[in-house]
C-alpha cells in the first residue's frame, strides 16, 4: 500500500548502514494509514538514528514525502531487536 | 506593559481587536506583526493574521521580546527591558531538519528554467579550473567494496552522493538526471527533471533532509572527509535565494516606513542567513534571530 515510501526507506537505510543485507522494512496496514518498521543489523541502529535523532528525523521527512505518492499517512518505526 | 495577542483575517482587523482589548486609541499603542495572513510564500500556511500590541510605553522605542515557539505566553515576559537584551547576533548553526508531517505538496513545487552558475563566491580553493564531471548511472559506487582508505577523494564522495540521489529518485518513481560539479572540495549535486517538488517540500525542508542524508550516506561509505556537499533540486536554491533577497528588501522598506519591528516566518538557517546578509547592507534596519529550530525566525527592527 505504500510502495514508494517503502522503497525510499529501504534505499536510505541501506545507504547508511554497513550490513546492507540485514536491512528489513516491513509494512503494516492500519486501515486509514500504514506503518513501516525498519530493522538493521545489531549495533547499527545508532547510526540510523544519528546524533540526537537527527538522521532519524531526516529519514522520516523524506520517507513521508514519498508517501505522498502513495497517498497514505505513514508511521515509521525504527525497531531495536 | 502587557502585550495582547490577537488573530483576524487581516492585520488591520487584528490590530482593531488588540486596540479593543487594550482600550486605547491607535496612537497610544504599538504593534508587532507576528504572522501575515495566509503567508503562502515563505513557510507554513496558517491563514490568519496575528499581531500583538501593547500600550506604548512613554518615551521608549518599540522593543522585541524573546519568543520561544509560537504558543508561548508572552504576557509573562512583560517587564520592560532594553531591546538589546534579546538580540542574539547572527546565528547560523547548521541543524535545521525540522520534522514536518505536513503537506509536502504545498511548497515550491513549481519548476522553471534555471539559469544558474554558482561560480563566483567560492572560498578560493581552486579558482577557475573547476573540473566538471558528469556522473551517470554507470558509476555507482560498489557497496561491497568499502575499505577505509584515509584520504578520500572529493570525486569519490561526489559519486557516493550521486549514487544516493539516483537511488532516491528511482524509489520515488521519478525521472531525473543527477549531475555533479566538483570545484576543489566543494561538491554540487544537481537533480533536474519534471515534478520534483516532493523532493523539495515546503520551504525546502524535504530538500534539507535529503541533503543531510546524502551527507550521512557519503560519510558512511567513505569515512570522514573534508568536503562540502550541497544538493539542489530543480534549481530550487537559486530561485529561493533570489526570492528571499527580494522579500528581505520589501520587509526592510515596511519596517522603515512603519517604524515597527517585523517578525518573519520560521526559516532554516541558510535562508535566515540570506535575509541577514541583505539587511545588513540596508540603513535603518537591523535583524537578528529568535527562537529555537525549527521555529527560529528572523526579526527585523528599525535601527
Image (cartoon, coloured by chain):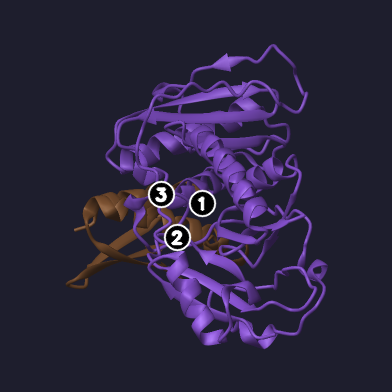
Q: Residues within 10 Å of mark 1 (few under 14, many from 20)?
A: many
Q: Colour in which chain A is shown? A: brown
Can you give x and y, in whole percent of width and height, for residue B36 in the image? 47, 61
Colour purple, chain: B
Query: Of the residues tagged 3 and 1, which is closer to the observer?
Result: 3
Contact, mark 1 vs mark 2 (Cβ under 8 Å): yes
Q: Quadrant of residue A72?
A: bottom left
Q: Between residue B177 and residue A41, name the one nearer to us.
A: B177
* Mark 2–mark 3 distance (CA, rounded to whole Å): 28 Å
Q: Quadrant of residue A28?
A: bottom left
Question: Of the residues under marks 1 and 2, which one precedes in the sequence?
Answer: 1
Indicate the chain on which mark 1 is placed. Answer: A
Q: Is residue B129 left or right of residue B295?
A: right
* Mark 3–mark 1 distance (CA, rounded to whole Å): 26 Å
- B266 relative to B271, above or below: below
Disc 1 target residue:
A17
Can you give x and y, in whole percent of width and height, for residue A15 in the image? 47, 45
Contact, mark 3 vs mark 1 (Cβ under 8 Å): no
Check residue B201 in the rendering and tell me which mark sits there, or answer none: 3
The answer to whether residue B159 shows anywhere in this view is yes
The answer to whether residue A50 shows anywhere in this view is no
Indicate the chain on which mark 2 is placed. Answer: A
Q: Between residue B102 and residue B131, name the one nearer to us.
A: B102
Q: Residues within 10 Å of mark 2 (few under 14, many from 20)?
A: many
Can you give x and y, in whole percent of width and height, for residue B271 in the image? 59, 47
Can you give x and y, in whole percent of width and height, for residue B63 in the image? 73, 70
Q: Residues within 10 Å of mark 3 (few under 14, many from 20)?
A: many
Q: Between residue B183 and residue B222, name the one nearer to us.
A: B183
Q: Quadrant of the N terminus of chain B?
A: bottom right
Disc 2 target residue:
A40
Q: Residue at x 62, y 46 (%)?
A: B253
- Give the residue furthest to the top: B129
Amino acid at each position: 500500500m505504500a510502495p514508494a515510501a517503502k522503497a525510499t526507506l529501504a534505499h536510505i537505510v541501506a545507504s547508511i548502514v554497513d550490513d546492507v543485507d540485514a536491512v528489513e522494512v516491513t509494512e503494516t496496514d492500519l486501515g486509514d494509514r500504514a506503518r513501516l518498521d525498519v530493522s538493521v543489523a545489531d549495533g547499527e541502529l545508532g547510526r540510523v538514528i544519528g546524533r540526537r535523532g537527527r538522521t532519524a528525523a531526516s529519514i522520516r521527512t523524506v520517507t513521508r514525502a514519498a508517501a505522498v505518492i502513495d497517498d497514505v499517512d505513514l508511521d515509521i518505526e525504527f525497531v531495536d531487536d | 506593559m502587557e502585550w495582547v495577542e490577537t488573530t483576524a483575517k487581516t492585520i488591520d482587523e487584528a490590530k482593531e481587536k488588540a486596540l479593543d482589548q487594550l482600550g486605547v486609541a491607535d496612537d497610544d499603542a504599538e504593534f508587532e506583526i507576528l504572522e501575515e495572513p495566509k503567508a503562502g510564500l515563505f513557510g507554513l500556511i496558517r491563514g490568519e493574521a496575528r499581531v500583538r500590541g501593547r500600550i506604548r510605553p512613554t518615551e521608549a522605542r518599540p522593543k522585541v521580546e524573546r519568543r520561544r515557539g509560537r504558543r508561548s505566553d508572552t504576557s509573562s515576559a512583560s517587564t520592560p527591558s532594553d531591546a538589546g537584551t534579546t538580540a542574539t547576533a547572527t546565528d547560523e548553526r547548521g541543524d535545521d531538519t525540522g520534522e514536518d508531517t505536513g503537506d509536502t505538496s504545498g511548497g515550491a513545487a513549481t519548476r522553471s528554467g534555471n539559469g544558474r552558475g554558482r561560480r563566483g563566491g567560492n572560498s578560493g580553493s581552486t579558482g577557475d579550473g573547476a573540473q566538471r564531471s558528469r556522473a551517470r548511472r554507470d558509476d555507482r559506487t560498489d557497496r561491497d567494496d568499502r575499505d577505509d582508505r584515509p584520504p578520500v577523494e572529493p570525486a569519490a564522495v561526489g559519486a557516493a552522493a550521486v549514487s544516493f540521489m539516483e537511488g532516491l529518485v528511482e524509489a520515488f518513481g521519478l525521472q531525473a538526471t543527477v549531475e555533479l560539479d566538483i570545484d576543489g572540495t566543494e561538491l554540487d549535486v544537481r537533480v533536474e527533471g519534471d515534478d520534483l517538488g516532493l523532493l523539495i517540500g515546503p520551504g525546502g525542508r524535504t530538500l534539507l533532509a535529503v541533503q543531510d542524508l546524502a551527507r550521512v550516506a557519503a560519510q558512511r561509505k567513505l569515512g570522514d572527509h573534508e568536503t562540502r556537499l550541497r544538493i539542489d533540486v530543480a534549481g530550487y536554491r537559486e530561485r529561493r535565494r533570489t526570492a528571499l533577497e527580494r522579500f528581505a528588501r520589501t520587509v526592510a522598506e515596511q519596517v522603515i516606513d512603519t517604524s515597527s519591528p517585523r517578525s518573519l516566518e520560521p526559516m532554516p538557517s541558510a535562508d535566515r542567513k540570506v535575509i541577514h546578509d541583505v539587511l545588513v547592507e540596508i540603513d535603518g534596519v537591523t535583524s537578528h534571530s529568535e527562537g529555537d529550530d525549527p521555529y527560529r525566525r528572523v526579526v527585523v527592527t528599525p535601527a
